[in-house]
Amino acid sequence: MCKTIAFLLLFNNMKKRLLSGVKPTGAPHIGNYFGAMRQFVDLQDEYESFVMIADYHALNFIHNKQEMEKNILDVTLDYLGIGIDPEKVIIFKQSDISAHTELAWIFDTITTMPYLMRAHAYKDAEAKNAEINVGTFNYPMLMAADILLYDPEIVPVGSDQKQHVEYARDTAQKFNKIYGDTFILPKELIMKDVATIPGTDGQKMSKSYKNTIPLFGTDEEIKKAVMGIVTDSKTPEEPKNPDECNIFALHKLFLQGEQLQNLRDKYSKGGMSYKESKEMLFEEILALVKPMRERREMYRNNIDTVKEILNKGKEKAKSIADTKMNIIRSNIGVNI
Ligand code: ADP
Ligand code: TRP
C-alpha cells in the first residue's frame, strides 16, 4: 500500500466518532435544520460520522406501509439535500441492523420501570394519551442501544433530546458496573445559540404546534409561513423592539455582525414595517434553501443511487454493530 494511503487510513482511524438519529416522521422545518440537521454537515470532516434513519422509533407513530416507505426515502433525501456527503458519512436505516433491538432488550433487563417513567417524553405522552404503547415507554432503551453499539464520543442532538442521551450514558454506566467495561460513555452535543428555534407564533418551532417554516417547501409555502409570523400591531413608522420580535429572532439565524446590527438599528429607529422585515427574511431563507433543494431534486431523480447509499451504509454499520454485539453477548454470558 502506498504511504499516503496508509497515512490517510491511520488519520481516519484517529477521528473521533459521532452518531445521531433522525425519525422519519415528516417534512423537516427550519428549527430541525438549525437545531439538529446542520450539525451533521458541519461536523462531517472532523468526525467519523454515523447518521441513522430511526425507522423503528418512528414505528411508534406510523402504522402504514406506504407512509413509512415514503418517509424513509424522504428523510434520506433531506439529509443528502442539506449537504451530507455519503462518501464521508455512514447513512443507514436502524431496521437494517437487528443488533439495535437485540441490545434494547438486554438493556430492558437492567432497567427499572420507575426510571423509564421519569423520562420527559413518557411523561408528555402520558399527559396526552390515555394509553401509551410499550414502544413509547421503551423508547429511551432503543435509543441507548442505537448509540452504545457504535461507541461514539458525541451525539449531536437538539436540546429536547438531551435527556435521552443522558439515559444512554446512565445505561452504559450501569451495564459496565454489572458486566465490566463494555461501553464508552457518550456525550450529547447541543449547539448553544440555536438550542430552541422559535416558530411563527414565537413558541418553539414544532410540527406538533403547526408553527413551522418548511425547509424543503415551495417558495409559496415558505412565503405563506413567513408572512404568517405573529407580530404586535405597531405601525411602520413606530420604533420596534427587535428583541421582542418573532421575525427578528429568525433573522438572527441568517445574519451576523454588521448586517444584524443594521437591522437592529432599523427596528429601533422606526420607519420599517414588519412586512418589510418578513420579506427580507423570506429572501434570506430562499438563499439558504435553493441550492439544497436542487441537490435534493438531483438525488430524487436518482432514487436507485439513494437506495445504494443506504445499502452501503447498512454493510458498514452492520460490521461494526455485529462485532460489538459479539462482545456484549460474551460479557453477559450467552456466548458459550
Ligand atoms: P418536532 O418538534 O417538529 O416534531 P422533532 O422532534 O422531529 O421535531 O425533532 C427532530 C430534531 O430537531 C431533534 O434533534 C430536535 O431536538 C430538533 N429540533 C426540533 N425542533 C427544534 C427547534 N424548534 N429548535 C431547535 N431544534 C429543534
Ligand atoms: N429520538 C431522536 C429524536 O426524536 C431520534 C433518535 C433515535 C436518535 N435514535 C437516536 C438521536 C440516537 C440520536 C442518537 O429526534
Image (tube, rainbow, N blue to C red):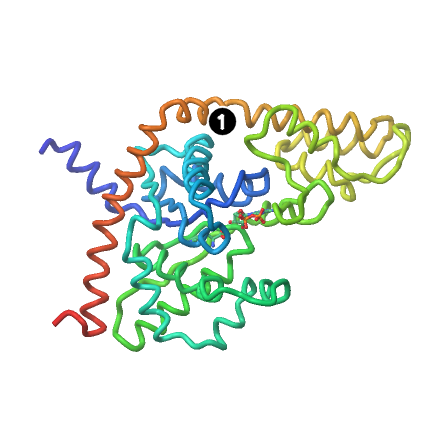
Total numbered labels placed on residues in the image: 1
Q: Is mark 1 within 8 Å of ligand 1?
A: no
Q: Horizontally, is 62 left or right of 182 in the view?
A: right
Q: In which quarter of the image is residue 262?
A: top right
Which of 111 and 251 lies nearest the eye of the viewer? 111
Question: Which amino acid lies under the numbered mark 1 shown in the image of this protein?
Answer: Met
Residue drawn where x is 62% and y is 23% of the image: 219
Q: Where is residue 31 in the image (x, y as percent from the top left)?
A: 59, 42
Q: Horizontally, is 72 left or right of 102 in the view?
A: right
Which of 56 and 273 lies nearest the eye of the viewer? 56
Q: How crowded is mark 1: few (under 14 residues within 10 Å), some or many (20 or more)?
A: many
Which of 210 and 193 lies nearest the eye of the viewer? 210
Q: Quadrant of residue 264?
A: top right
Q: Where is residue 118 in the image (x, y as percent from the top left)?
A: 54, 72
Residue matched to label 1: 292
User: The C terminus lies in which quarter of the figure?
Assistant: bottom left
Residue drawn where x is 31% and y is 69% of the image: 106
Q: Where is residue 156 in the image (x, y as percent from the top left)?
A: 45, 49
Task: Tell me if residue 239 comes above or below residue 105 in the rendering.
Answer: above
Q: Horizontally, is 152 left or right of 161 in the view?
A: left
Q: Is mark 1 on a helix, strand or loop?
A: helix
